[in-house]
């Protein structure tokens, strides 16, 4: 056997512990059997978490303050900038579907991470170059009301957006693979490592948010007060260092082995195609086939039973390659079972998009001074989301989970779907708080006669916005981490990169929905002689109406989610 040969000894006394120590379904970097004693675990995961911290530092170094750059050096209106931010965020969150396909079907997760990191470095380098070019400044415009008509440097605009979407492409390859590769370092069949894997998702998000927090505290200040080129250049250097550190761990990683020669995408696609071709097949014929294959009622065969038609060939024959196996049908059902959960999380993603767009623009209008010489960058308030996460995750993992575990008997304390639902409820509260704070801001602006003075600071401290950011952070601890674990755990093992890309695609589609909502509301509420909800002069806008709308949509979404979550059948 391959494992015996790898041991270098024929002695049973040596062979037995090595066989016991072997991690099933994994090999080392040379394709040899891999052992628990010298691979994987937290040691290997730490290298992978390190590259993720750097990647989040780079990504949020762009996304968190992007609306400020677009409305500043590039001279776009508030609504147009918000639409561009949402479009880019949406694309960046949908591209992981492509990255996951490439990783799971061709390159593997390790190689995909390396290629994506190199693409990241290229994109960030070009982005830094674009910021060095001479650009338009908002101060060059005679009035904020005609800022959109001021022209930016065309070469700079083209290079900027090319670089921006190159970063989105890099994130598409990086994001679904890094977390799946990190979770692969823990053996799900080993009770001790299985518990560690559950904690891995919590601490992964903790470290990821630590990188984001560093970005918001340091990079946003550099971008707003020193130099945009430096603000984009530092993440590029961080990605270079992270890639080197990631490669240093090559010899310690566990690499998943493909059990099937045929791509999981092709297997699942084949099931749907066969079921469609057999749509006229009688239920009695399917029942006979199920009985012949020994399918028992408790084997989840009752849900999405129409896919069982794939067990028969279109012409009733049983030619090799035309009939789907029971395993293939169950894989397809596992993926289809995720769709209702995916769809009912989209409004949460729309709410999530507001923290980097309109929340930031609100902060620009408010009193940001800490001293006579220092002002808080408005985008830096997003750090309170990360800070809330960093502070609450240890409490969740070390206090809440043990108590809940003692009450429910579940290793994770509460189910993944219960965790996601709790975060959705908190997101409704965050939107309600945001609406109430915006009402207060508008009242102060009216009280001091600042309705038509958008360049004058509203005498209301920016710290009023902190509660809505903190509530966002608490919601993320439940929903974001819950979604990551859910979409990793509930797909076939060979599709785990795809599972995590499906989780990310929720936020991609959510960003596009947010962009559509902003565009539609802008047209519906604006027009001749009317200010839209998103007027460039926010003192004449009504962001509070928009926040109440999102709160109402979140309530509707939560009701639908509870229905589907209650009827969900876990895959494992």
Image: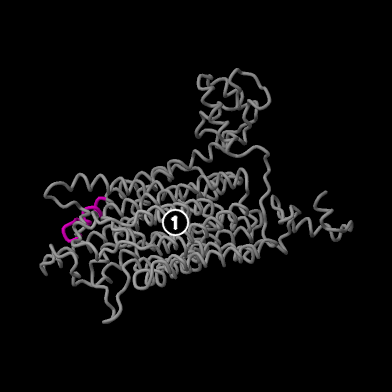
269 or 201, which is in the foreground?
269
The image quadrant of residue 388 is: bottom left
| Residue identified by numbered label 1 | 480
Q: Residue furthest top?
A: 315
Question: Any magenta on residue 553?
Answer: no
Does residue 461 appear in the picture of this structure? Answer: yes
| Residue at screen point 41% across, 50% down | 507
The image quadrant of residue 382 is: bottom left
From the top left corner, tell me how far across and down residue 141 is, in percent.
Answer: 22, 62
Q: Residue furthest right?
A: 10
Does residue 406 appear in the picture of this structure? Answer: no
362 or 118, which is in the foreground?
118
| Residue at screen point 57% across, 33% down | 297
192 or 457, which is in the foreground?
457
Question: Any magenta on residue 541?
Answer: yes
Q: Is residue 299 left or right of residue 372?
A: right
Q: Is residue 435 above or below residue 336?
A: below
Query: Which residues make up the magenta segment?
Result: 538-549
Q: Is residue 397 above or below residue 417?
A: below
From the top left corner, tell me how far across and down residue 83 is, in percent.
Answer: 32, 51
From the top left corner, tell me how far across and down residue 140 is, in percent.
Answer: 24, 64
């Amino acid at each position: 056997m391959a494992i015996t040969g790898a041991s270098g000894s024929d002695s049973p006394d040596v062979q037995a512990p090595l066989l016991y120590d072997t991690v099933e379904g994994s090999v080392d970097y040379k394709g040899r059997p891999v052992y628990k004693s010298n691979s994987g675990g937290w040691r290997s995961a730490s290298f992978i978490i390190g590259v993720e911290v750097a990647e989040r530092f780079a990504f949020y170094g762009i996304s968190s303050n992007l609306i400020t750059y677009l409305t500043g050096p590039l001279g776009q209106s508030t609504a147009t900038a918000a639409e561009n931010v949402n479009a880019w965020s949406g694309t960046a969150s949908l591209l992981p579907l492509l990255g996951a396909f490439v990783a799971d079907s061709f390159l593997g997760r390790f190689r995909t991470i390396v290629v994506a990191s190199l693409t990241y470095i290229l994109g960030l380098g070009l982005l830094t170059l674009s910021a060095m070019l001479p650009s338009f400044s908002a101060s060059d415009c005679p009035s904020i009301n005609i800022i959109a008509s001021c022209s930016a440097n065309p070469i700079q605009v083209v290079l900027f957006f090319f670089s921006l979407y190159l970063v989105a492409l890099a994130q598409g390859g990086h994001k679904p693979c890094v977390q799946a590769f990190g979770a692969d370092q823990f053996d799900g069949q080993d009770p001790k490592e299985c518990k560690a894997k559950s904690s891995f998702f919590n601490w992964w998000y903790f470290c990821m948010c630590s990188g984001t927090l560093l970005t918001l505290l340091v990079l946003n200040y550099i971008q707003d007060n020193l130099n945009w080129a430096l603000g984009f250049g530092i993440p590029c250097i961080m990605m270079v260092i992270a890639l080197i550190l990631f490669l240093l761990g090559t010899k310690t990683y566990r690499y998943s082995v493909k059990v099937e020669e045929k791509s999981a995408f092709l297997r699942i696609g084949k099931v749907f195609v066969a079921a469609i071709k057999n749509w006229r097949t009688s239920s009695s014929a399917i029942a006979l086939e199920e009985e012949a294959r020994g399918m028992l009622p408790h084997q989840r065969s009752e849900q999405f039973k129409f896919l069982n038609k794939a067990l028969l060939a279109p012409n009733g024959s049983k030619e090799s390659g035309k009939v789907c196996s029971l395993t293939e049908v169950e894989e397809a059902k596992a993926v289809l079972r995720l769709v209702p959960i995916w769809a009912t999380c989209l409004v949460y993603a729309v709410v999530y998009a507001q923290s980097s767009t309109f929340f930031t623009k609100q902060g620009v209008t408010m009193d940001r001074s800490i001293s006579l010489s220092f002002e808080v960058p408005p985008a830096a308030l997003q750090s309170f989301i990360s800070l809330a996460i960093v502070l609450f995750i240890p409490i969740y993992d070390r206090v809440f989970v043990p108590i809940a575990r003692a009450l429910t008997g579940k290793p994770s304390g509460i189910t993944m779907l219960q965790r996601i639902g709790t975060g959705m409820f908190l997101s409704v509260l965050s939107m309600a708080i945001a609406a109430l704070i915006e009402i207060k801001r508008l009242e102060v602006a009216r009280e001091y006669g600042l309705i038509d003075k958008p360049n004058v600071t509203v005498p209301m401290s920016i710290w009023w916005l902190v509660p809505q950011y903190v509530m966002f952070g608490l919601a993320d601890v439940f929903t974001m981490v819950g979604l990551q674990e859910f979409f990793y755990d509930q797909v076939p093992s060979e599709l785990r990169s795809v599972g995590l890309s499906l989780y990310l695609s929720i936020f991609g589609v959510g960003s596009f929905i947010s962009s559509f909502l902003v565009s539609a509301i802008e047209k519906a509420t604006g027009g001749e002689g009317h200010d839209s909800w998103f007027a460039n002069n926010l003192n004449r806008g009504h962001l509070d109406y928009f926040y109440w709308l999102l709160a109402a949509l979140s309530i509707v979404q939560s009701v639908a989610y509870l229905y589907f979550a209650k009827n969900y059948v876990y895959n494992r």
